[in-house]
Image (cartoon, grey):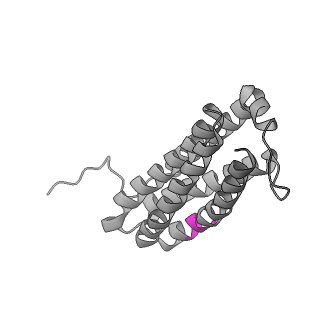
Amino acid sequence: MATNIFRKNRPALGRLGLYLLVFVGAALALNAWIFTGPAIQWSRTLENPDWSPSGGVIGTVWVGLFTLMALAAFTVDRYGDEANKGFARLAIIAQYLVCMGWTLGYFGLQNVANGFYVTVLALVLSIPVTLAAFRASRLAGALMIPLVLWLGFALVLSWSTWRLNL
């Protein structure tokens, strides 16, 4: 069987740059939209629990989490087990899209309940996604753990905020 000399077995560092550009770039763009548009005005009218971090802290954490997700996706591509890497990569991308959907559901529609529901979905999805990442690469799975932990915190915060604003 002939070998395709143009197909590399492992993606180059350019793929890492692409993941970072998409995962982190979109998060930064959404943060810019939130903090410069009408969404920030709406969010300032909400009651938040006393223990709630500031919006800047939350945005910074999400940028960090999206960076870790980009690194996890790259790690799956670069070092992942061949039998599991395709599904794990797809699962990480799906998780990313659900997490990005929170911003649109919460800030875009200016609806606190949507934020809670999407957080539930994101947390429930994050567990099998993290397991899929672990099956493909231990490092990729480890990179997903902070997301699961943050989503647990975000669920409590989202529920508390929703209850305060009924």
Q: Residue at x 56, y 71 (%)?
A: 142
Vertical order, 134 against 22 (above or below) = below
Q: Is residue 100 left or right of residue 48?
A: left
Vertical order, 141 against 2 (above or below) = below
Label count reads 0
Q: Residue furthest right?
A: 50
Q: Is residue 126 left or right of residue 57?
A: left
Q: Residue at x 73, y 46 (%)?
A: 59
Q: Main secondary structure of the magenta part?
A: helix
Q: Is residue 164 left or right of residue 65?
A: right
Quarter residue 107 falls in: top right
Residue 74 seen by the camera: no
Q: Residue at x 79, y 30 (%)?
A: 41
Residue 104 seen by the camera: yes
Vertical order, 116 against 105 (above or below) = below
Q: Residue 1: percent from the left, percent from the top?
A: 14, 57
4 and 81: which one is in front?
A: 81
Range covered by the magenta-colored residues: 142-146
Locate the C terminus and report the quarter of the image it occupies: top right
103 and 90: which one is in front?
A: 103
Q: Residue 82: percent from the left, percent from the top?
A: 33, 65
Q: Residue at x 82, y 49 (%)?
A: 54
Q: Residue 105: percent from the left, percent from the top?
A: 58, 38
30 and 55: which one is in front?
A: 55
Q: Residue furthest top?
A: 38
- Is 63 within the magenta? no
Quarter residue 152 falls in: bottom right
